[in-house]
Amino acid sequence: MDNPKIFEAINKIMIDLEPIAKKRKNEAQNYMFRGVDDVMNALSPLMTKHGVFPSIIDTQDIQSDKIQSQKGNAGYHYVRRYTIRFYATDGSFVDVKSDGEAADYGDK
């Protein structure tokens, strides 16, 4: 494609995106952070406005370990790599790799 729309659309999203404040607090380590939900809530309407949608096209398990909490509960620590494809309305796209990390103790 001569002028892929995806790059123009991402630029418009970046122009419209307001800073996302660190409003959440990690009490255990005493620091402020912005969560994934905060980022998605800010980006979702802008992606819709500018005709961009994501789709996960690949996942890779990077790491999986048995872990134990401070209280002695058994759990798992996972790291997974995602390839996310962002599409524009003309079919152009860009792929992005991103790692996700989680711990699960099966207690919820």
Image (tube, rainbow, N blue to C red):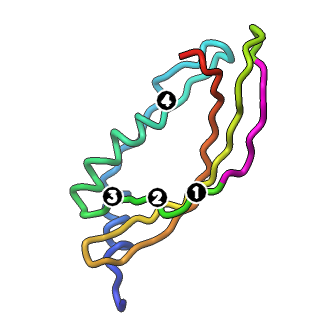
**Secondary structure predominantly adopted by residues drawn in magenta:** strand
- Disc 4 + disc 1, Cβ < 8 Å: no
Confirm or deny contact between disc 3 and disc 4 (CB under 8 A). no
Which amino acid type is marked by label 2? Ile
Give the spatial CA distance, label 3 vs label 4. Answer: 20 Å
Q: Secondary structure at mark 4?
A: loop
Q: Residue type at mark 3? A: Ile
Q: Position of residue 38 (x, y in %)?
A: 41, 35
Cα gap from disc 4 to disc 1, whole angstroms: 29 Å
The answer to the question of whether label 1 and label 2 lie on touching residues, with beta carbons closer than 8 A, is: yes
At x 30%, y 56%, the residue is 47
Residue position marked by numbered label 1 in the rendering = 59
Instruction: Give the spatial CA distance, label 1 vs label 2.
Output: 8 Å
Which residue has dot 2 on it? 56
**Residue beneath the point at 25% across and 72% down:** 89
Q: How many marks?
A: 4
- Callout 2 secondary element: strand
Is the Cβ of the residue at disc 3 closer than 8 Å to that at disc 2? no
What's the mark number on residue 22?
4
Classify mark 1: helix, strand or loop.
strand
Q: CA distance from mark 3 to mark 2?
A: 20 Å
**Crowd band around label 3 with a 10 angstrom C-alpha radius: few (<14), some (14–19), many (20+):** many
Please provide percent x and percent y for residue 54: 38, 59
Image-based side of 100 in relation to 90, left or right: right
Q: Which residue is mark 3?
A: 13
In this view, the mark in front (3 or 2): 2
